[in-house]
Image (tube, rainbow, N blue to C red):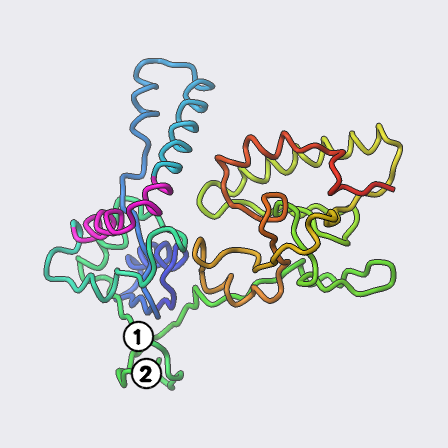
Amino acid sequence: MVIGSGATAATLVPAIAGDCGHVTLLQRSPTYFVPGRNENDLANTLRELQIDETWIHEIVRRKALFDQEMFTHRAVAEPEVVKAELLEGVKAFLGEDFDIAKHFTPRYRPWRQRIAFVPDGDLFQGIASGKASVVTDEIERFTPTGLLLKSGETLDADIIITATGFNLNVLGDIDFVVDGKPLNFADTVTYRGMMFTGVPNMVWVFGYFRASWTLRADLIADFVCRLLAHMDEKGVRQVEVALRPEDRDMPLSGWIDPENFNPGYLMRGMHLLPKAGDKPEWRHTQDYWLEKDELPAIDLDEASFVYS
């Protein structure tokens, strides 16, 4: 048995189904999935045309980013249409008689939580073949032979794998101290999701939820290199960000707007994370298509940066 509903659970189930008598996926609530072929048709076509691999990489990368941007925009602008398309993809594997409304229809609109890619629909193929099954319910308690669910149903299992429910480990359990005072990360305000008020000489690498994590890691790495070079030019050893006079009365909110993105692991840890303001400099936008232009253009001498 695998407990979970996201990408980890959906990867585990088809990976082990062939070696088990049966695998049950137990989930508290469903996740949106995108089944598709596990290869890139555009890359294959370009290789048939004998295009240079460097060009292929760049073209395919840009097409993937373009498609992600369009899909994200549609998920916000026409969520019911996108929802119907995603559920049709599941129905194509499981058929009309399967209870997709119960087991594969989330309570939130598409992209308020991560959407998991299912290569070749392997998870759904396992369910359709009878090698795997899905149960949507909540756990009451463990029993000597498996689990008792809140519905009263019991599930027997030889092995139970938990692929859900983790808690954020903010700052890696490091006890930061600034000028002799323990740092409470939740008391800080984020500067574009990478620096924090009152914390000198620290940049946090936090990637994207809706695009490749490393896209933002690259943008932040470039920013850090530019910031270090700027500090060398100024002959300083320390930099931190601080609210400007015009920022000090601005409304503060949580790290991420739950209307934008609200997975359980993030919501459970919001009290541990920095605050966000209502101005672009003091928000974590999670928008690559905006930040790819904004982060390289940051004025390192603007009033938010304090050097010493």
Q: Main secondary structure of the magenta part?
A: helix
How many numbered marks, from 0 up? 2
Based on the displayed image, in which of its 4 quarters is residue 248 positioned? bottom right
Depicted 295 relative to depicted 264: above or below: above
The residue stretch that appears in magenta: 71-91
Give the side of residue 93 with respect to residue 202, left or right.
left
Q: What residue type is labelled 2?
A: Lys
- Nearer to us in this view, 40 or 244: 244
Q: Which residue is drawn at 36% across and 62% down?
A: 5
Q: Residue 32: x percent and y percent?
A: 31, 54
Labels 1 & 2 near each other (Cβ < 8 A): yes
- Nearer to us in this view, 308 or 171: 308
N-terminal-most mark, 1 or 2: 1
State the SS at label 1: loop
Depicted 121 relative to depicted 253: above or below: above
Q: Residue 307: x percent and y percent?
A: 83, 41
Q: Which residue is drawn at 54% across and 32% down?
A: 292
Q: Residue 213: x percent and y percent?
A: 52, 43
Give the side of residue 233 with respect to residue 32, left or right.
right
Q: Residue 120: x percent and y percent?
A: 26, 44
Give the side of residue 99 with respect to residue 8, left or right.
left
> Which residue position is annotated with label 2?
150
State the SS at label 2: loop
Depicted 143 relative to depicted 220: above or below: below
Q: Which residue is drawn at 31% across and 39% down?
A: 38
Q: Which amino acid does label 1 sit on?
A: Asp
> Which residue position is annotated with label 1?
137
Q: Residue furthest left?
A: 97
Q: Which residue is drawn at 56% across and 60% down?
A: 254
